[in-house]
Structures are given as structure tokens and as C-alpha cells.
Image (tube, rainbow, N blue to C red):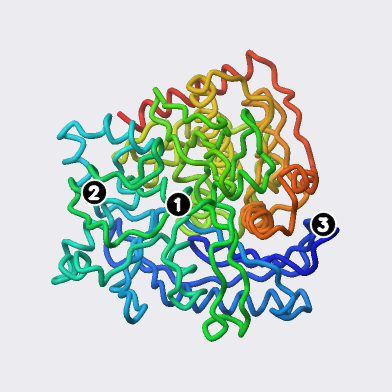
Amino acid sequence: MVAKGYILAIDQGTTGTTVLVVDHAGLVRGRATVEFPQYYPQPGWVEHDAGEIWQGVCRTVAAALQDAGISAAALHAIGITNQRETTVLWHRRTGRPVGRAIVWQDRRTAGRCRELKQEGLEPDWQARTGLLIDPYFSATKIAWMLDHQEGLREQAEAGDIAFGTIDSWLAWNLTGGALHITDITNASRTLLFNIHDCRWDQAILDRLDIPTALLPAVVPSSACYGRTDPAAFLGQSIPVAGIAGDQQAALFGQACHRRGLAKNTYGTGSFILLNTGTEPVASRERLLTTVAWQLGDEPVEYAMEGSIFVTGAAVQWLRDGLGIITAAVETEAMALSVPDTGGVCFVPALTGMGAPYWNPDARGLITGLTRGTTRAHLVRATLESIAFQSADVMAVMCRDAGMALEELRADGGAAGNAFLMQFQADLLGVPVDVPAISETTALGAAYLAGLGSGFWADRAEIGRHWKLARRYEPRMGDAERAGHLARWQRAVTLAVS
């Protein structure tokens, strides 16, 4: 029997919120996107107003329902996916944030992280959490907030303050404060969660002096957690039944449901996840081990992740910093207007380098400039840098996991750039597949909620909804590929030295 109604998927991202209305066939019947402000109070600091995020979610949901031509009464369940690691603290009694949220991009705790590394804690913490000690993750953000607001630690110890990543904040508001939860994927991105015994790690909490009273309950990625409060949201009581961090949701939305399948989301940064099955794979080469998802009471499944900080952001820099393009859509034609980069190589370490280098002090570098270098050469080198960084991560990932890559599934805005996708396939030597529906992150949230609420029977049913839009087959020879990679590695060595 086909379930009635629709799934509402809330994709709360770093610069905006996208909401999809998805039907039982996995088709998008309504969509809307609303941006919200970013705050940069000091160099290296990035903040959001959590109240503005919630207001933006409400506006986006209303617009998506209007676009679908349905009322909230037609919704079967709600799924949430979110920017990960971004840290919110709020007052339990009033539901008001104690201050602005600290965003995953924020680097203010770099000094604290260096101190923790100098104590020799990183190998043990990585073994427990699957993560490296880095300002990227939530743990040192929480500690910073507790240390820098008078009286906040005492309130937290008394149980008056709640911590959450953005999924927790949305679940709290959707249910009128009834739910203080986080799903297991988001918990695994805090640097406070032991991914082996699947609970908050008391030793790390004690070392950072973070009270356990702050923490949300950890729940599966797909289950019925509770219902919306009609007084707080749309006047309806709707099941909230799926939650996952954005990259895990994209992995699920790309139907990478079995060991060995991988996806790359090409956004502001790029995030490559490889499904490694029900056993966590420890990285020997500084990749991350993370929870992929947990469906109800099924075993937890894991992934390896490589986080690349600057990919699409490098194209934005061409536009906003250098003014050599007016829109990202121009880059494909410009790259194809020249036969190669003319020897130019761009390492876009504009905010340090993430995986597999994890060098926060690396700086951007352009090599090979001549009098013959044009805007088109710089644009082509920028697009190639995205593919080079992704190839670096995939090579390390496959070595760590002991498996060969069969294909890469691509999503995100840059997946629509045919030059980039072809160059990526050429560097990897395997096909790159782009799905028919590009909003795979929101789709993943919809699928998780649909499974958790009985809208779909199992992952095999939703896997059949995945449709291929275009496959890019590799066509570069081994010698040419090796030459490109050697040129890139020479430039990277300069950038990180």
C-alpha cells in the first residue's frame, strides 16, 4: 500500500535553508530556499544568529508548502539535515540562545587545540572519536563559550543551559522544547562522542570541563522521536522522524547504502564520504572516521570522511576577491576556452588545508604564471584544484579502507560543471555519476524520515528512486594523469612548507 501524504525535508545549511516537499515516488513537489546573515566579528571568527536561523526555517517551510500547493495537514513526517559542528547554547527555560552560534568554519579555538595536541592527547582522542583535535569540531567551541561568558558555566552545571548542533536547535523549536536530542551522526562530529560504545565520552568531557547536563540525548538517524508542537509550528502535530548531518544525509540520499560506495558533495568546501559498513575503519593518514547513520535499532554504520575546506569558495574568491568572473556559471565555458592551464597551478589554501594535510597554517599559492597567463587559465586552474584536492582524499581513503573505488557519486552546485566532472573522472580513473535530483542532502533527510515513519518500507525501496542524470567516463591516459598529479604535488609541497 502506498503511504499517503508527503515528507517535509529541512536542509539547514551554512548560508541558507532549503526545504523540499517529497512525495512517495521520491519526486520533489515543492521547494524553497532562504538565505540568512553571516557574522564575522573578528578575523577567523564566523557566527550565526540561531534565532534568525529558526525564523528562516519557518519562512522557508511556508514557501515550500505554497510551492507544492499543499497544506501542513498533508505532511506525513519531517526530516532534518544540518550544517554540522556549528554550536548553539540556549536557556532551557526561555529557549533563547545565550549568544550567537559559533559556526563550523570558525577558528577562534586554534590555540586551545594546539595546546591539547601538545599534551599528546590527539592519538587517544582520535581512537575514541574518529576525529582529529581541530577548531572545526564542536568540543572546543563549547568550552570557549563556557569560559568567555560570566556565570554561564555555573548555569550549565545547574542544568539550566542546553547545548546542541543545529539539528538539536531545530528539534527543540519544532516541538516547543519537548525534545533535546541529537542524532548519532551529529553527535559523532562533536569530538565528545565515543563512536565505538556510542555514548558521550566522559574522559574528554572532564578534560574540557564540559558539564554532562548540557548534552542532548543521542538518538538514531531514523526513528520517530516526537511530534511538532502545533502552537510552535504550522498548527499541526507532525512526526519528526529523521535527522542526519548534512554530509551523512547526502551519502544516504545518493543511495550509497552499501560498503564501498562513495560520494563527494561539491559546495563551499567539498566533503567525500566512503561507506565502510558496520565496522569503523581507523585512518592511518589523518582522515576522519565518522558515523554514517543508524536506522532504528539496526547496527550503526560508519564512513570515512575527507573534509576539504576550500573548493567552491575558491570560485567565489575569483568572483568577489579578484573580480575576474561575475558568476560561477561562467567558469565552465572559460575553462574550455583554453586547452590547458598554461602551466598554472592554484592551491586554494585560503583558510589553511583540510584533509589529508590538516595544516591550518598553509597559505594559498598560484604557480606557473607567465606573461601569457589569462583569466581563463586562472579559472581552469581553480576548477582543476577542486578535482586535485578530491583525488588526494580519495587516494588516501582507498588505501586506509583497503578497497578500490568503483565510482564516485557527485552532488552539490559544482556537480553541474561538466568540465570539472570530466576532469575529476580523468584524475580518479573511475566514472563520476551525477544524479537526476541534485538536492541529495535534503533528499537524504526525507528518506530517513520516511523510513522512520513507515512512509517507505526499507532502503531498497528508496534506493530505486535514485536516478542517473549523467555519467562521466575517464578518458585520460595514465602518463598524462601522472603528470598532472606530479605538478599538483609540487605546488602543494610549497603551500604547506
Q: Which residue is mark 2?
A: 205
The circle drawn on residue 186 is 1
Report the side of 486 relative to 59 (left or right): left
Report the side of 95 relative to 63 (left or right): left
Q: Is residue 416 visible?
A: yes
Asked whether the beta carbons under mark 3 and mark 1 sit within 8 Å of each other, the answer is no
| Residue 402 drawn at (x, y percent) | 54, 18
Q: Amino acid at mark 2?
A: Leu
Earlier sequence position, callout 2 versus callout 3: 3
Q: Sort mark 3 into few (<14), some (14-19) or many (20+) by Cα contacts within 10 Å.
A: few
Hey, which residue is sitting farthest right in the picture? 1
Q: Which residue is mark 3?
A: 25
Earlier sequence position, callout 2 versus callout 1: 1
| Residue 56 drawn at (x, y percent) | 53, 76
- Seen at 33% across and 47% down, the residue is 200
| Residue 95 drawn at (x, y percent) | 37, 78
Q: Amino acid at mark 1?
A: Asn
Quadrant where the C terminus is found in the figure? top left
Q: Sort mark 2 into few (<14), some (14-19) or many (20+) by Cα contacts within 10 Å.
A: some
Q: Amino acid at mark 3?
A: Ala
Q: Secondary structure at mark 2?
A: helix
- Seen at 16% across and 34% down, the residue is 118
Quadrant where the N terminus is found in the figure? bottom right
Q: Secondary structure at mark 3?
A: loop
Location of residue 347 (image quadrant): top left
Q: Is residue 469 visible?
A: no
Q: CA distance from mark 2 to mark 3?
A: 44 Å
Earlier sequence position, callout 3 versus callout 1: 3
